[in-house]
Amino acid sequence: MASHMGTTIGRVTLKNPVIAGAAEHLIDADGVRRALAAGAGAVVVKSTNESEAARRQLQAAEYLLLDAEWRPLPWSKDAPAAAMLACRSGLTPLPFAAWLEQTARLDREARAHDSYAVASLILAGLEPCVAMARQVEEAGIRVLELNIGTPYASQAKGAVATELDPARVAEIVAAVRAAVSIPLWVKISGQSERVPDLAAAAFEAGGEAVVMAGRALGLVPDIETFAPMLDTMLGFGGAWNLPLTCRWLAESRARLGPDRPLIGTNGAQSGLDVARMMLAGACAVEMASAVMVRGFSVLAAAVAELDEYLARKGVTARDLIGRAADRRKTFADLPPRPDAWRRHIPS
């Protein structure tokens, strides 16, 4: 891949900023290999932890695609880009030892693609998480993503974590950082007004990048049955979330400065969406829901589209980072537009 596509996340240099984010299609080794073959700059292997409840949850998982009128859509690679993914999910069914061996082997294979297979741990208990992180490094895996921002903690108590207190984020990240020396990416929730504070705490405790912000927890009532769709709260992802992710990227960049690597997730459907998140402050972007629904060709198409866009604009991927965020004005900075509102009301 041409050098203009490269990006840097702390100590990690990627050949391009398109990352395959962890999801069910990256449980099996074949899925990770397909993502690597599609040209992803990195692939985050589906997460694990010590919780048997989290593993069992996968066998109760269910998935739904919805259109703009909240109607179910067929699960298809031809689903519209605006389709929303709603699901209740779970972690890899593999025992930790098998997951560790598979992830280490895949990361060795990833070197041939000039890429990475990133290990992902989701917090349940802190001590087991720290012990697992040590084993990740001992296995030779080059990068660890620590997910402390899943949407499901209130629904799957004790199995996963949604950490919303900066002090608690700092405690967790510091403990994992003390246990490992490899690059540590910290994935946080967007379900808070304190996302920049959560990011700051993660960096101050030793995180080298912060991933923001994953699927959101929501509920859709079914107007025919009067029950919640899929009977419960669901994690929601889709194109609709791109502006929210970009908001948190821009605000976090303003809070932390330009030298703290941020990774965007939730909302990117294409290479141009990757560019949008980079303009908001991301140095790389994870794509998960779009790939899960439409297939691994989404990754190849995103890389190709971003490459074409950079060539058309005469810039590098690194040149994009934060340019829109740094031009952001407050409402008070904007000029008056007398009676502009009158042009936007029904006649």
Image: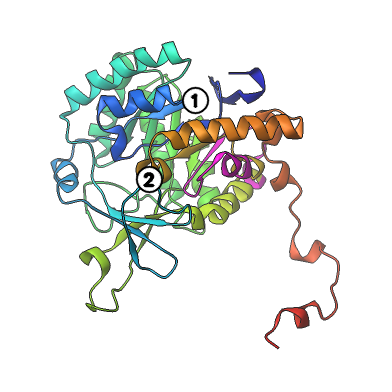
Q: Report the residue at 45% width, 23% height from top.
A: 183
Disc 1 from disc 2: Cα separation: 22 Å
Quadrant for the C terminus, please. bottom right
x%, y% of residue 176? 36, 30
Give the extent of the magenta segment.
254-276
Amino acid on which the number 1 mark rests in the picture: Gly
x%, y% of residue 141? 35, 18
**Is 343 on the left-hand or right-hand side of 293?**
right
Q: In this picture, is 281 found above or below 132?
A: below
Q: Quadrant of residue 275?
A: top right
Is disc 2 placed on a helix, strand or loop? Answer: loop
The residue that disc 2 covers is 77
x%, y% of residue 54? 19, 44
Quadrant for the N terminus, please. top right
Q: In this picture, is 171 found above or below 153?
A: above
- Of mark 1 and mark 2, the one earlier in the sequence is 1
Amino acid on which the number 2 mark rests in the picture: Lys
x%, y% of residue 232? 24, 64
Q: Quadrant of residue 23?
A: top left
Q: Nearer the viewer, residue 251 or 69?
A: 69
Q: In this picture, is 304 found above or below 335?
A: above
Q: Report the residue at 61% width, 34% height from top.
A: 306
Residue 249: say if magenta. no
Q: Quadrant of residue 223?
A: bottom left
The residue that disc 1 covers is 41
**Is 122 on the left-hand or right-hand side of 248?**
left
